């Protein structure tokens, strides 16, 4: 196997362009191909540290939008005023708290918080070489489970997954709740990496009356 090139073209380009990590170019390519980001949108970045995807999302939504990042690790780099970050577990925090963070500071006091337009996740499990793909798929399934509480109807998703036995099933599970789902390996991903990204558009959120009906039928 060829030696791993840590300081490759994207690493050096990130330094020149002011991005916190080479992973910024993965989101840039995802957006160039699938157009999931645009001015005015509200974006949630799950597992956002060190902050390179926050930087890309903030540039794309402009000051007309809002970007919220959550991670167990802090984001230490300065961010634009329309980016807010929180240190917490995305699977334990009240989704309403995250949605409230996306309310612009100049919003009317009577403005109602609304769900995110886009969910992003560049999260990956700590790799051990054993069951990495299974643990990566588990992260993706957790994100899909969070989507009804966080993502608006018609919204978009981009999340990392490792290639393996669970890749196709997770792709199918994503297609069950989104209209358009694609797999993508961005050019900035190292050739030896098993990283893939699932990009989904057109979230089919349950209607409020449907959700209520389901709750009433629940035991």
Image (cartoon, rainbow, N blue to C red):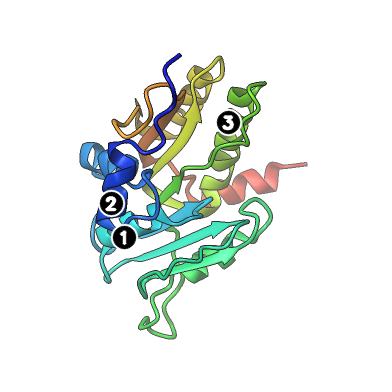
The CA distance from mark 1 to mark 3 is 27 Å
Residue at coordinates 44% horizontally, 22% vertically from top-left?
3
179 shown above or below 20: above
Q: Can residue 117 be seen in this view?
A: no
Q: Residues within 10 Å of mark 3 (few under 14, many from 20)?
A: many
Q: In this view, does 196 lie above or below 213?
A: above
- Mark drawn on residue 55: none
**141 lies above or below 215:** above
Q: Nearer the viewer, mark 2 or mark 3?
A: 3
Q: Name the residue under label 1.
A: 41
* Residue 7 point in image, percent of width and height: 36, 39
Q: Mark 2 points at which residue?
A: 37
Q: Which residue is drawn at 53% across and 19% down?
A: 169
Q: Where is residue 199 in the image (x, y as percent from the top left)?
A: 36, 35
Rendering coords of residue 130 (x, y %): 67, 21
Mark 1 or 3: the one toward you: 3
In space, the residues marked 1 and 2 are separated at their CA atoms by 7 Å
Q: Badges 2 and 3: C-beta atoms under 8 Å apart?
A: no
The residue pinned by badge 3 equals 136
Q: Is disc 3 placed on a helix, strand or loop?
A: helix
Name the quadrant of the C terminus.
top right
The answer to whether mark 1 and mark 2 are in CB contact below 8 A is yes
Outermost residue on the bottom side: it is 109
Gap in angstroms between the C-alphas marked 2 and 3: 24 Å
Up/down of 214 relative to 136, above or below: below
Q: Relative to the observer, which residue lies in front, 139 or 218?
A: 139
Query: Between disc 2 and disc 3, whose residue precedes?
Result: 2
Residue 145 shows up from this direction:
yes
Name the one closer to the observer, 164 or 180: 164
Asked whether 173 or 56 is in front, the reply is: 56
Badge 1 element? loop
Which quarter of the image is occupied by the N terminus?
Answer: top left
């Amino acid at each position: 196997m060829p030696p791993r090139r840590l300081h490759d073209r994207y690493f050096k380009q990130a330094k020149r362009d002011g991005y916190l990590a080479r992973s910024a170019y993965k989101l840039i390519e995802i957006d160039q191909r699938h157009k999931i980001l645009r001015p005015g949108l509200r974006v949630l970045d799950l597992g956002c540290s060190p902050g390179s995807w926050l930087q890309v999302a903030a540039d794309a939504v402009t000051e007309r939008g809002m970007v919220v990042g959550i991670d167990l690790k802090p984001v230490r780099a300065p961010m634009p005023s329309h980016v807010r970050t929180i240190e917490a577990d995305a699977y334990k925090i009240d989704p309403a708290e995250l949605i409230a963070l996306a309310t612009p500071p100049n919003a009317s006091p009577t403005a109602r918080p609304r769900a995110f337009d886009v969910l992003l996740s560049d999260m990956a499990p700590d790799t051990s070489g054993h069951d990495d793909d299974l643990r990566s798929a588990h992260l993706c399934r957790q994100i899909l489970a969070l989507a009804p509480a966080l993502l608006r109807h018609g919204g978009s998703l981009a999340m990392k997954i490792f290639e393996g036995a669970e890749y196709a099933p997770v792709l199918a599970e994503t297609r069950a709740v989104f209209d358009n789902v694609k797999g993508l390996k961005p050019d900035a991903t190292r050739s030896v990496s098993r990283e893939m990204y699932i990009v989904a558009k057109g979230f089919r959120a349950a209607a409020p009356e449907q959700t209520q009906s389901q709750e009433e039928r629940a035991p």
